[in-house]
């Protein structure tokens, strides 16, 4: 290529790059202006709806309208953020290309032997024009980059402590326990009153005695952003076996949090209004969106409000309340809980148990352990989650360790705590943004790993050391659905993003889809099939390995609960409290529909011959 060709090519590239940069810069400025006019946390329309609700507090339709309005406003805002961030990178790329092309152009032009003869005043005019264009162009690009920076980082400065609930004087509605059987009083161990001075302790030791906290210990307890935590040996007890876990329902979505239940004789028909196949129901004292968990004859749920956080243990055979554990007097716990949305609350995370203790985490960042009789073992605060909806990632335990996914606006991390003491075994920082999804245990070539999903990565971690084993960058937005896992394949998805199937051994992407995407309902994968439920009421089945859509059922009701496979059938509860039951099949075969009689968002739990469902107010036991 001769000098003249280089001159012409570089000139054309510079012109194209200049036009591209100008167009992107103008779009960024327009987008910034639009975002600056929109506050994702507050809006006049939303305030007007809330004012209407004060005059009509029991209007459920108005409540749902407020929730939907807030959800749509936030999603639109975050989508605009992504556009601005992408545009900034495009502008930066265009500017680099433009600068390089101009450098080549002027270098080639200087080598031309006979420059054009022009008058001095013409040369001066050209120089002034060129300088003007460069100055204006640079100013536009600088403004655009500044606008993109300000837009993208607006919610990263969200101060959770400044947005605490501002009304602590609201009275609590009276709660009446349904006397299916005479309710027992709280056991002596669970109802021990806190002795004077005990509210000044930082952590409850394993033997239940309080240990006084020094100022240094208190300060270190509230630090949440550690770069690396030294791995410590796990507790001597390796925890229950897989067989023990499979005959119980010890975590969100059952054994290993995969949504596959081994129990048989699960009922498919009931009538809550008539009481048919409803063995008992009991009102839960405090509200929560966490799912029931089961070990032996005991069932556990949690509830919370601004005043207190509590764990409840019921006899799963007759619904008797056995004990109540209160999460209080925890060093670092905020005096006033953070602001959370109504559809998350302070008790959204499902508990877990290893058969020796039950573990809970609340939206305040408090983690607490009780033994199976309600005796408090230990408690600690992980730092108040910087989260504009509220914390909802559920707990899971394996091999003597309690795993906590703690992805917030301040950054992501995953932790393993010792089941017996609550001390940190290991802690791994993640290159991830905030997530509401929960960890899943996956067995790969005889070893277990923890699989997490967030924006932008899906990743696996060694359960013993916390080492990141693999990572695939494929997600975006507000990730709420946990992954599905089966046959060495991990499937992750998020609404307004994509669904991605990943070979866990090679990290190869097997297939992608962007049509039917879940918002909150986790994915169910098993034996060559994948099931997903959208928030707008479409339930679909895919071929797990190929990604082929096999069937869909559009029932139109919103869904937050996750599908669960039990006894050869897939159970899916919608938010209206209707359980839809399908054959586990490559063809659409609906077994039945059963109404609970009240709203329900949590995922049900299963035991032999029974289903345990948490509604807005009650826990129901369904059985023949």
Image (cartoon, grey):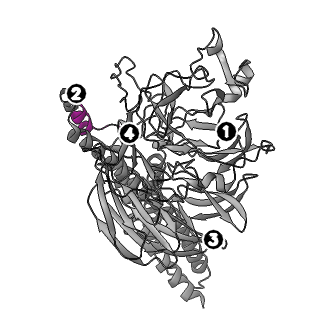
* Helix, strand or loop for disc 3: loop
Of marks 4 and 3, the one in the foreground: 4
| Among the two numbered marks 4 and 3 on one chain, the one whose residue lies closer to the N terminus | 4
* Crowd around label 2: few <14 · some 14–19 · many ≥20 (10 Å): few
Q: CA distance from mark 4 to mark 2?
A: 35 Å
Closer to viewer: mark 1 or mark 4: 4
Work out whether mark 2 precedes mark 1 in sequence or the reverse, and give the earlier one: 2
Q: Secondary structure at mark 2?
A: helix
Q: CA distance from mark 3 to mark 1?
A: 36 Å
Asked whether residue 47 is drawn in magenta, I would say yes
Give the mark toward the camera: 2 or 1: 1
* Residue found at the far top of this picture: 196
For mark 4, does the 10 Å Cα neighbourhood hold few (<14), some (14 to 19), or many (20 or more) residues? many
- Dot 4 corresponds to which residue? 280
| Residue 452 colored in magenta in the image | no
Q: Which mark is residue 507?
A: 3
The first of marks 4 and 2 along the sequence is 2
The magenta stretch spans which residues?
Answer: 41-50
Which of pointers 3 and 1 lies earlier in the amino acid sequence? 1
Q: Label 1 vs label 4: CA separation?
A: 26 Å
Q: Which residue is the site of mark 1?
A: 356
Image quarter (top left, top right, bottom left or bottom right) of the N terminus: bottom right
User: Does residue 34 appear in this view?
Assistant: yes
Image x and y of residue 461, in percent = 68, 57
Residue 416 percent location from the top left of the image:
69, 45
Rendered position, 228 above or below 559: above
Residue 136 appears in the figure: no
């Amino acid at each position: 290529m001769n000098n003249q060709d280089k001159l012409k090519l570089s000139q054309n590239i510079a012109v194209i790059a200049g036009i591209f940069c100008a167009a992107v810069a103008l779009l960024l400025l327009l987008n910034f202006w639009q975002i600056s006019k929109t506050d994702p946390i507050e809006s006049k329309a939303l305030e007007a709806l809330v004012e209407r609700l004060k005059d009509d507090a029991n209007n459920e339709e108005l409540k749902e309208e407020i929730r939907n309005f807030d959800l749509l406003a936030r999603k639109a805002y975050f989508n605009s953020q992504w556009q601005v961030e992408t545009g900034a990178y495009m502008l930066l790329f265009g500017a680099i290309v433009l600068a390089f092309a101009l450098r080549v152009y002027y270098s080639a032009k200087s080598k031309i032997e006979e420059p054009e003869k022009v008058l001095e005043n013409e040369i001066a005019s050209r120089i002034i024009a060129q300088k003007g264009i460069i100055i204006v162009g640079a100013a536009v690009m600088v403004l655009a980059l500044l606008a993109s920076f300000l837009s993208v980082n607006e919610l990263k400065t969200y101060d959770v402590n400044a947005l605490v609930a501002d009304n602590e004087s609201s009275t609590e509605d009276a709660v009446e326990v349904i006397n299916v059987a005479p309710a027992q009083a709280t056991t002596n161990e669970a109802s021990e009153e806190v002795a004077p001075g005990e509210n000044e302790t930082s952590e409850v030791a394993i033997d239940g005695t309080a240990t006084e906290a020094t100022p240094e210990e208190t300060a270190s307890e509230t630090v949440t952003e550690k770069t690396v935590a030294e791995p410590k040996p796990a507790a001597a007890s390796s925890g229950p076996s897989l067989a023990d876990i499979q005959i119980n329902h010890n975590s969100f979505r059952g054994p290993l949090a995969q949504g596959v239940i081994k129990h048989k004789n699960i009922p498919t028909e009931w009538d809550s209004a008539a009481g048919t196949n409803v063995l008992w129901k009991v009102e839960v004292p405090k509200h929560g969106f966490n799912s029931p968990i089961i070990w032996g004859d005991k069932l556990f749920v949690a509830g919370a409000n601004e005043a207190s956080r509590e764990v409840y243990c019921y006899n799963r055979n007759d619904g008797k309340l056995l004990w109540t554990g209160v999460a209080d007097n925890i060093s670092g716990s905020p005096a006033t809980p953070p602001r959370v949305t109504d559809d998350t609350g302070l008790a959204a995370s499902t508990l877990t148990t290893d058969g020796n203790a039950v573990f809970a985490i609340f939206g305040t960042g408090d983690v607490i352990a009780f033994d199976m009789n309600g005796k408090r073992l230990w408690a600690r605060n992980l730092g108040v989650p910087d989260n504009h909806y509220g914390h909802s990632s559920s707990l899971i335990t394996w091999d003597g360790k309690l795993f906590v996914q703690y992805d917030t606006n301040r950054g992501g991390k995953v932790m393993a705590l010792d089941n017996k003491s609550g001390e940190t075994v290991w802690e791994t920082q993640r290159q991830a943004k905030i997530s509401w999804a929960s960890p899943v245990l996956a067995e790969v070539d005889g070893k277990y790993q923890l699989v997490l999903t967030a924006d932008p990565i899906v990743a696996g971690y060694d359960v013993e050391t916390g080492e990141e084993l693999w990572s695939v960058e494929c997600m975006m937005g507000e990730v709420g659905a946990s992954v599905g896992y089966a046959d060495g394949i991990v499937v992750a998805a998020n609404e307004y993003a994509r669904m991605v199937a990943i070979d866990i051994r090679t990290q190869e992407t097997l297939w992608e889809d962007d049509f039917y995407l879940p918002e909150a309902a986790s994915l169910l994968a098993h034996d060559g099939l994948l099931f997903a439920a959208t928030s707008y009421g479409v339930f679909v089945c895919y071929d797990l390995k190929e990604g082929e859509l096999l069937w869909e059922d559009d029932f139109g009701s919103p869904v937050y609960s996750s599908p669960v496979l039990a006894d050869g059938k897939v159970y899916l509860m919608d938010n209206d409290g209707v359980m839809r039951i399908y054959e586990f099949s490559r063809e659409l075969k609906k077994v039945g529909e059963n109404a609970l009689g009240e709203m329900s968002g949590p995922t049900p739990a299963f035991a032999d011959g029974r289903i345990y469902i948490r509604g807005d107010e009650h826990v129901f036991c369904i059985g023949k």
